Amino acid sequence: MPAAARKTVAVIGAGPGLGMSVAHRFGREGYAVALISRTEARHAGYVAALAEAGIEAASFAADVRDRDRLVSALGAITDRFGAIDVLYYGPGASDLNTPPRPITETTAGDAREAMDFLYPAIDAVGAVLPGMIERGEGGLLFAGGLSAVMPMPALGSLALSAAALRAYALTLNVALAGEGVYAGNLIIGGLVERGDIHRLVTSQPERFGDVGSRSLDPDVIADAAWDLYAKRDRPEATFSAFQ
């Protein structure tokens, strides 16, 4: 596809689960894919898998909490592909080896640390939104946790950041109405298959229990991400393994 006609999706939080499913889903629609994650260790395999599916892709290493590197990576993507037409923001925000304190023990410091995964979303949007508005088209997609809409005291400060990210996405959705730019949110409750956290949990049933069928198919969620962006008939979609 000629560069002028090709669109590009930037996937922030590229991993073997949902990130790659989103990459493949948009790739099937003719999008070039730019992958961003903390390290380059698995990037070659990701790019090769996309190439095998006939999808043009490139990878960029950046920790979202390092603002300068994140903005630099987005600039490099724009230089490489000409523009970022869709931004998907879905970095992992939890470390099972250091679980959060429950909400009754959450400190202000815990909350500030949890918000470190909201601020990069704002930085990323700030880097790409002006161009989208100028072109009169584009999309911003965010992925967050079920605790944004369902009280989950055990998640403590993570519930606060999930709710803040959702509020940001939904407010952007309203603010951008009429600009040709769509903002949408994915609410995800449960382990996403093929992802790193799913692999860790299922490898330690003595610690986490048997998740059994309580997991989510990343391809189904990626289909919903595409539908949100393409149809623009609702601001969010919810997936829960707890219902």
Image (cartoon, rainbow, N blue to C red):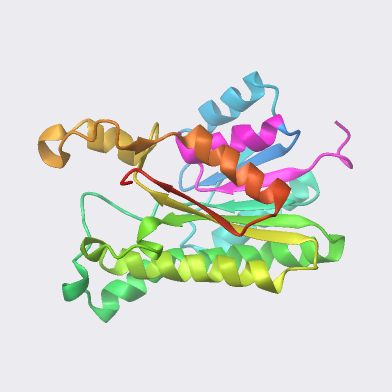
From this view, report whether residue 240 is shown above or below residue 21: below
Residue at horizontal 78 percent and vertical 51 percent from the top: 83
Q: Position of residue 228 (x, y in %)?
A: 64, 49
Extreme residue in the front direction: 243
From this view, report whether residue 174 is shown above or below residue 131: below
Q: Position of residue 49 (x, y in %)?
A: 57, 23
The segment highlighted magenta reads 1-28
Q: Position of residue 54 (x, y in %)?
A: 70, 22
Asked whether residue 77 appears in the rendered view, the answer is no
Q: Position of residue 56 (x, y in %)?
A: 71, 31
Which quadrant: the N terminus?
Answer: top right
Residue at horizontal 34 percent and vertical 37 percent from the top: 215
Quarter of the image for residue 2 reads: top right
Extreme residue in the left direction: 206
Extreme residue in the bottom direction: 108
Residue at horizontal 35 percent and vertical 61 percent from the top: 147
Count of residue discs: 0
Query: Does the magenta portion include 162?
Result: no
From this view, report whether residue 84 is shown above or below residue 71: above
Query: Does the magenta portion include 23?
Result: yes
